[in-house]
Image (tube, rainbow, N blue to C red):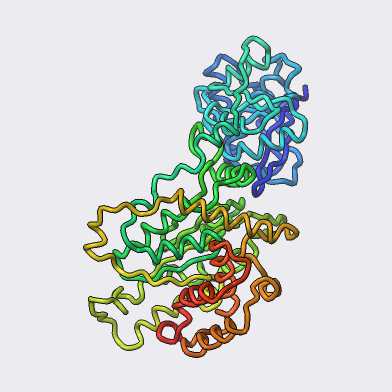
Amino acid sequence: MLTKTFGSAVQGVNAYTITIEVVVSMGTGFYVVGLPDNAIKESQQRVEAALKFRGYRMPRTKVVVNMAPADIRKEGSAYDLPIAVGILHASQQLTTERLGDYIIMGELALDGELRPVRGVLPIAIQARKEGFKGFILPRENAREAAIVNNLDVIPVDTMQEAVDFLEGRLSIEPVVVDTRDVFQQAANQYAADFADVQGQENIKRALEIAAAGGHNVIMIGPPGAGKTMLAKRLPSILPALSMQEALESTKIHSVAGKLGANASLLNTRPFRSPHHTISDVALVGGGGNPQPGEISLAHNGVLFLDELPEFKRTVLEVMRQPLEERRVTISRAKVSIDFPANFMLIASMNPCPCGYYNHPEKECVCGPGVVQRYLNKVSGPLLDRIDLHVEVTPVTFDQMTETRRSEDSRTIQERVETARQRQAERFREQPDIHSNAMMPSQMVKDICRIDATGLTLLKTAMERLGLSARAYDRILKVARTIADLAGSEEIQLPHLAEAIQYRSLDREGWAG
């Protein structure tokens, strides 16, 4: 007897429906075909133990499980439940005509209980697209799948519950999540707030400009100056996630298995802070079955690289293309997968190995040429993609003990959102450009025009400060963002002057 159940395979951030065909016939042996990995081949032991524990029998004849289409590689233990249900139906221990209505996924424990799986959200989206009535899955994944409307999400704790539901002996209410209500209730709630930061007004200003224009930032300063603390608060002043952005980010975290039990829609911007020992693949994504890396997990949020020169050179270099294209392509012999990677990069570094070069009070003990070699670990092409270079100085005792509370994140965020609205209006006919930082060079010339006085100031600054040619476009983009924050249609001299000071690493005294 031939039985068909339906599961799903995830490639990149998209899912593909898999038909699981089971035949029980004369002969002996258990065979799984259709490019399964080892976890699927081992499902025989889990399925057999679970069937026996729940009072069913494993057929002692020949069992063939075919996973179609056979040319797509299937991975993971999430196919245990559809294989078990298929075997029960093919051996006539389960009688139902509802198998074709549902996508079924779940990993079996040896006692028939279900364990959660990853990639549930893209699977649910594809199931609705292909017209399935519902999705039977482990209870811990139900809220995540229920983000998708017009699909019956049936949560089950055990294989027995799935069988009873399919046979009509058990009624299970589909899980319903009001995504807009959940999204609005918890949206924009961050544990860290700029109100907690004493002093550092110039750094806060730089981060506000970065948030307003989507600019990448690097902070240079001695240990303990507050670089990490400030970076962690950057997501709290970015514009609130839109529903579309929340769905995109949730899909990526779902595929990577980062959502956790009973999770639903992400409602705050991601903040990823990988350690400097991270590998190329872990940062940009990849592997045998390509998985999203840290830059994709930071999509629509912030990627923070602390102590930038300590990262391996190759790791930093593979980031250059994703920074430019806002996505990363993982190519394999038979498949090419795109992961979105539209993130803001914020990096921090000490000015030298000992950390006290240019410190107002402490003496730098690094030898001649050491500072230069340390700074040269960060390549010019990478710095070329970072718009703001900010020098962070230590907070004084008087600033730390001030009782006056600083400006909170919500107040700053309102100014940022107003500036972003101006940019949305400016780029309304450019669907791929959403902020000033994304402008190509040709557009910079058209949009960031400055008068003769401004040109003179910029020329003088580049000559006297020894700024490189690559700083020209960056200064104009940042000046345009400062003008947007000020509500100005034109880039004025104060806007340009402020933008010029954010090119520390281009100066001859630093990385000349």
Q: Residue at x 57, y 39 (%)?
A: 118
450 shown above or below 119: below
Q: Residue at x 51, y 45 (%)?
A: 268
Nearest the eye: 122 or 216: 216
274 shown above or below 152: below
Question: What is the number of callouts on the image?
Answer: 0
Percent coordinates x, y for residue 6 in the rendering:
71, 30
Q: Is residue 189 visible?
A: yes
Percent coordinates x, y for residue 163 in the rendering:
63, 17
Percent coordinates x, y for residue 320 in the rendering:
58, 69
Location of residue 473 (image quadrant)? bottom right
Would residue 406 appear left or right of 101 to someone viewing this image? left
Location of residue 177 (image quadrant)? top right
The quadrant of the rendering that contains the N terminus is top right
Nearest the eye: 3 or 508: 508
Nearest the eye: 15 or 224: 224
Location of residue 448 (image quadrant)? bottom right
Q: Residue at x 61, y 53 (%)?
A: 290
For this orientation, the residue located farthest to the top is: 169
Would residue 213 appear left or right of 86 to someone viewing this image? left
Nearest the eye: 288 or 216: 216
Percent coordinates x, y for residue 15 in the rendering:
69, 42
Q: Residue at x 62, y 33 (%)?
A: 147
Q: Is residue 327 visible?
A: no
